[in-house]
Amino acid sequence: MVGFIGAAGLRSAELPGKASICHSQRRVYEFRRRCIALGSDDDHGLREQLKKQLIEGVRTLAGPDRGIFGMESDHRDRVHKLLAEVESMTPHLQPTSVIDTVVAGDWRVLYTSLTILGARRTRLALSTAKKPGLVELGHIYQSIQPESKVATNKVEFSVMKVSGTFTVTATYEVESDSRVGVTFQNSELMPAMLEKLLGQNLDLLTEIFNPEGHLDITFVDDTLRIGRDHKDNVFVLERVSKLASSTTPDQDT
């Protein structure tokens, strides 16, 4: 999608008065508190509109590579402005308090600023939208399991028409209202026969997708989640499924 008006296709003057508070791009808790305090159907409608624009922008500007293999700087800037708009409308000021109910479940990556470029992309023989390679990257999923405090990242790919998955398992602990500390546990490549094809590049895969560090949850609701890690990588994920036992309140109380 091209031709955005400002950051999110909306002019400040066109926003209703109480929603204009939320229009700030600064991710400051006081602004979030005021947005939620003024919560109404109008706020929900604006949030859904901004989410839709972000998803459309990601799919149009980042394309099938989801930003992993880089993108034009002006396209990246537009996506990140849209990200800031959505983050400023988060319905949960203390997202770690709703891990069991809202964050739990399975998610799919729509966009990330984590990149695989240059020598790393060449070593892994990764195929991109513009450059063919032996390895095609598929969907990337994350499963959050609060009962065991485990996060599992699963990367789908194919090597010369042989489908496989690379799974990284980590544990997490809540560190603040919005941050979780993440500890790497193990990684697994399936089927095992692919280890011979990847060889030492398996260590490179682990290095790229190792989540060790911390993650700030900057937006989460029933269908969309945004997080920023300790390396300032940003991740936009859409919900695939929710844990059967989870129930989701509309906002923090």
Image (cartoon, rainbow, N blue to C red):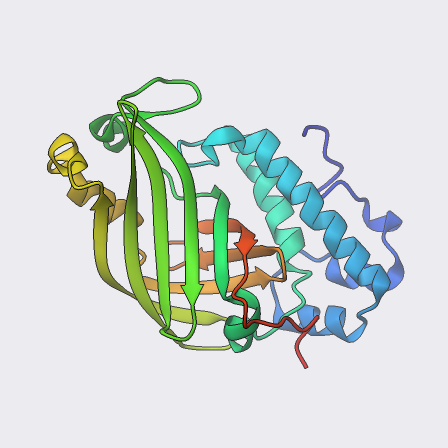
User: Does residue 179 lie above or below 160 as drawn?
Assistant: below
| Image-based side of 2 in relation to 207, left or right | right
Q: Is residue 171 visible?
A: yes
Rendering quarter of residue 119:
top left
Q: Is residue 117 visible?
A: no
| Image-based side of 253 in relation to 69, left or right | right
* Residue at image point 57% right, 45% down: 80
Q: Position of residue 39 (x, y in %)?
A: 80, 70
> What count of labels does the image hold?
0
| Image-based side of 235 in relation to 171, left or right | right
Q: Position of residue 120 (x, y in %)?
A: 24, 33
* Residue at image point 49% right, 62% down: 105
* Residue at image point 47% right, 50% down: 234
Q: Position of residue 70 (x, y in %)?
A: 43, 32
Q: Nearer the viewer, residue 143 or 133?
A: 143
| Image-based side of 198 in relation to 70, left or right | left
The image quadrant where one finds the N terminus is top right
Outermost residue toward the bottom? 253
Rendering quarter of residue 136:
top left
Q: Position of residue 226 (x, y in %)?
A: 54, 55
* Residue at image point 58% right, 31% down: 61
The image quadrant where one finds the C terminus is bottom right
User: Does residue 133 lie above or below 44 as drawn?
Assistant: above
Rendering quarter of residue 208:
top left
